[in-house]
Image (cartoon, grey):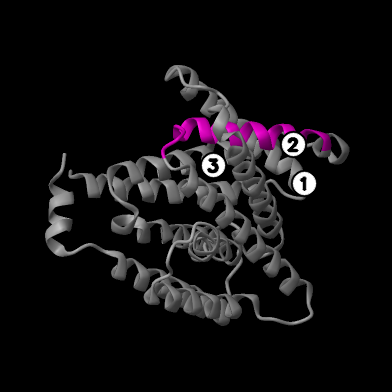
Amino acid sequence: MNNVVKGILALIISSLGFSLMSLFVKYAGDLPTVQKAFFRNFISMMIALVLVIYNRERLFGKKENQGWLLLRSALGLAGVLLNFFTIDRMVLSDADILNKLSPFFTIILCAIFLKEHIRRFQMISIIIALIGAVFIIKPSFSSDTYFALLGVLGALFAAGAYTVLRLLGSREKFYTVVFYFSFFSTVALVPFMIFQYEAMTASQFWFLILSGISAAIGQFGLTIAYSFAPAKEISIFFYSTILFTALFSIIVFNEIPDALSILGYIIIFSASYYMYMKNRPPKRERLKIAGKK
C-alpha cells in the first residue's frame, strides 16, 4: 500500500469520524449547544493530552505562538458552536455540506490576510460553491434560512481557524495545537455550561462521550492523512463525509433532503472536484509521490 492510498484511507476514516460526531451530537437530543460542545472538546482534550505527554511536547506551545494559538482556538470554538447549533435544527446532511464551504472561504481569507494569490480556477470554484449553497439555504424570511446562514457563518469561522493554522505552519506539533484548542474551548465553555446545564439521561451522556471520541478520530485522521500525501492529491476524499451524513440522515432520523438541497450538494461537490483536478500535479509527479514508502 503506497502513501497516497494510506492517505486516502486515513481521510475516509477521518470523514467517518466527523460524520459520527454529527450523528451523536444530533442524537443526544434537546440539550444546550454549549453543553454538547463542552463534552466534544473535553474528550478531545484528554486524548490530545495523552499524545502530548507521550511525545514530551509542550502542552501550550511556544511563547511566540501564543497569540496565534489563542486566535485559532477562538475562531475554531465559534465554528464548532455554530456547527452544532445548525446540526440540531437542520437536516443533518444540509448542515454538514454548509460546513464544507470552509475550504472555499479559506482561499478568500488567505488571499486577504496572507496575501496568497487566488488563481482563476479557484475563483470559479468559489462562485460555483456559493451558488450551490443558495440551493441549500433557499433564501426566504423563514427560520430555516436563518439557521442555514448561521451554518455558513460557522464555516467562515472554521475557515478563519484554518487560515491561522496555515500561518502557524510547522511551528507547533499537531497534537499540541489540538490540545490547546480543546483546553481553551473547555475552559471557555465551563461558565456557560454551568449556567445552562440540563440533566442528562445515561444514553445522552454516552452519546456526547462518543461525539468527543469521534471528533478526535476525525481530527487526528485528517492530520495523519496529510502526513502521507499532500492535500491536493487526496483532499477530494474528505467529501465522503457528505455520503456518510446523508445516509445517517435517512436511516437514523428519516430526514430526506429535498430536491433543491440535493442539487446544491452536487454543485458544491462539483466545485470541489473541479478545484481538486486543477490542483493535481502532473502525472509523472503523482507516480513519484505514489512510489514513496
| Residue 177 position within the rendered picture, expressed as x and y whole percent measured from the top left | 52, 35
Neighbor class of circle 1 (other Cα within 10 Å; few <14, some 14-19, many 20+) is some
Counting from the top left corner in percent of width and height, residue 227 is at: 32, 41
Disc 3 residue type (three-letter): Ala
User: Is the C terminus in the top left, top right, bottom left or bottom right quadrant?
Assistant: top left
User: Which element is circle 3 on?
Assistant: helix
Mark 2 or 1: in front is 2
Dot 2 or dot 3: first in sequence order is 2
In the rendered structure, the answer to whether residue 49 lies left or right of residue 287 reads right
Q: Which residue is mark 1?
A: 31
**Measured Cα–Cα span from mark 2 to mark 1:** 18 Å
Give the mark toward the camera: 1 or 3. 3
The residues tagged by marks 1 and 3 sit, at their Cα atoms, a distance apart of 18 Å
Q: Label for residue 188? A: 2
Q: Is residue 172 magenta?
A: yes
Residue placed most toward the observer, 25 or 34: 34
Image mark for residue 141 = none
Q: Earlier in the sequence, mark 2 or mark 1?
A: 1
As shown in the figure, which amino acid type bears the numbered disc 2?
Ala
- Foreground of the two, 276 or 60: 60
- The answer to whether residue 198 is seen in the rendering is no
Circle 1 sits in a helix, a strand or a loop, which is it?
Answer: loop
Question: Could you tell me which quadrant the N terminus lies in?
Answer: top left
Disc 3 marks which residue? 215
- Mark nearest the camera among 2 and 3 is 2
Image vertical order of residue 157 relative to residue 138, above or below: above
Q: Residue at x 52, y 59 (%)?
A: 245
Range of the magenta residues? 170-191
